[in-house]
Image (cartoon, helix red, strand yellow):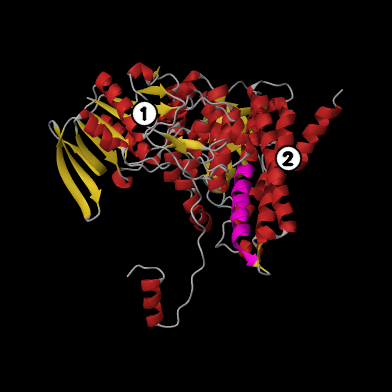
Amino acid sequence: MSLLDGRLSEDQRAFQDSARGFSQEQMAPFAAEWDADRIFPEEALRAGAALGFAGVYVREKHGGSNLSRADAAVIFEELAAGCVSTAAYISIHNMASWMIDSFGTEIQRARWLPKLMTMEHFASYCLTEPGSGSDAAALATKARRDGDDYVLNGSKAFISGGSRSDIYVCMVRTGDDSPGGITCVVVEKDAPGLSFGKQERKLGWNSQPTAAVIFENCRVPVANRIGAEGDGFKIAMKGLDGGRVNISACSIGGARACLDAAKAYMLERKQFGKRLADFQALQFKLADMATELEAARLMTHHAARAIDDGDVDATMYCAMAKRFATDTGFTVCNDALQLHGGYGYLRDYPIERYLRDVRVHQILEGTNEIMRVIVSRKLLDQ
Amino acid sequence: MKVLVPVKRVIDYNVKVRVKSDGTGVETANVKMSMNPFDEIGIEAALRLKEAGSAEEVIAVSIGVAQCQETIRTALAMGADRGVLVETEEGAEPLAVAKILKAIIEKEGPEIVILGKQAIDDDSNQTGQMLSALLGWSQATFASNIELGDGTADITREVDGGLETIKVKLPVVVTTDLRLNEPRYASLPNIMKAKKKPIDKMSPADLGVDMTPRLKTLSVVEPSKREGGVKVESVEELVEKLRNEAKVI
């Protein structure tokens, strides 16, 4: 519960109710099992898709929910409060679907979106490579034109949904070494020459498979190109603004769940004959956690609205929010773990899972160091 | 066939309710409100009748302050076709609510009215029964299953001894129990579509209903705090305490 709840529109409260109900009943009770057994919860994902979560800001025509980024921030916070890892995968699926919706042709939208919106098909987004992480524009996967096909060679790393997804939205190099040499193509899972690396073993995010995506003379029809040749980097960067808001919301959701758990634990746990809630040092800790979390939420919603309004500084606001919200999210989970003492470290309590799941948010969608690069570049740009 | 479902705006079931300091009621300012859970079950039951082809239209009715429109929107987002809001600032008591519903039912002509068996705020468990009496319709309270026949309905009721199935003639007033169904969540697109569905607004006076309270609230207090238990030394002591202290045997 947050102060912001009272500032939400009537519609947003309805979206929040729906997402919260779904998350608390169909995600939270199973999240520990999905994490421990590395289960990609396809049935739960499809149940969520039936409520419109697969295409929150995809237009209505092919089954999207056509909501704003600010609405999406409310929704992803709720989903993440139930299971951070699954919510984060849903946000990636949303981003890939949005790229097809926003930059694809009507033929491409009609071909791919209906099944993505029901999650009969799952989507992955492929930008990062083994040799280009923060320096995304240095990507080296080559796409050579051969008649009506592109022939892809190279590999993509850390791909959520890798090997399980049906649709891979990929950034590849069709031109020179500049950002203008990058093009966006959709690779379908049965494309000849497409293969996958082993499943990565990870600290968190265990309810989604992660693998390298490998192209060896992989043939993709030119008809699968999204936008024009050379548009890829611009599409990637636009996608990342929204991706950063989503991942911020996922950190906030996970941290909120930990804050609620810590609050309940403080009221119940007794040491030295008093409840933890009666120790002022811990009261102050809890107050700081809630305050920082509220600040992160406000920044995230502000950044979301900046995208919705087409603000020229939207990229900077998204970078600020992503840096702050994902750092705060981790810190709040960590503080909640500390308040739980030894129990917080046990898998019998959910805190350590939230901590492991939100940790990666400080790394992906652009590391928090890169967020500082984006912000300072904007500030110093005369 | 039309199905009419009254929906009440109540304090959300997750909220820890606090009594107002002057003892006149409970705190509702800045408190999350939502649809009475038994009414959600009623909406779900009506939607299933519609989806099964037994009903053509589901009408959601709410009585209360202007914000009750949100509760109606929730019903519309779940799938109800249209809403009726009877706006009043007065706290509506079960009898007044039943009278208002009777007036609306006489205008709308539904054959089934599905109410929650009670609202989780005042737990009266009276409106459905009063409505049935005012209309002279059959009633089937605490329903856990509804099977429609030809001009009749077989309704399974949750009673103290187990389950009781009765056959009633339509039109009928049904009240829902918890196990009737699990209500659906509204999907994001349906939440947006609900905004375009019509809501008729009227006042109790338009329906000729006198809202003057018949009940007087003397005081509202918190339940007494739970006290710690005691250990007894012997069976004799236990029996003695049960007889003389707890006075249960």
> Residue at image x 32%, y 70%?
B249
Tell me, yes or no, whether the highlighted magenta stretch contains residue A140. Answer: no
Q: In the rendered view, does B233 fall on the left or right side of B5?
A: right
Specify few, some or many for label 2: CA neighbours under 10 Å numbering under 14, 14-19, or 20 or more.
Answer: many
The outermost residue toward the left is B150
- B227 or A180, which lies in front? B227
- B239 or B162, which lies in front? B239
Marks 1 and 2, how far apart at CA: 41 Å
Which residue is under mark 1? B79
Check the picture and name the quadrant holding the C terminus of chain A. top right
- B53 or A148, which lies in front? B53
Instruction: Tell me whether circle 1 and circle 2 mark residues in contact (CB < 8 Å).
Output: no
Check the picture and name the quadrant holding the N terminus of chain A. top right
Which residue is under mark 2? A323
Q: Secondary structure at mark 2?
A: helix
Principal secondary structure, stretch drawn in magenta: helix
Q: Amino acid at mark 1?
A: Gly
The image position of residue A280, as x and y in percent, is 74, 57
Judge if badges 1 and 2 mark residues of a common chain.
Answer: no
User: In this view of the protein, can residue A73 be seen by the observer?
Assistant: no
Q: Which residues are magenta?
A: A250-270
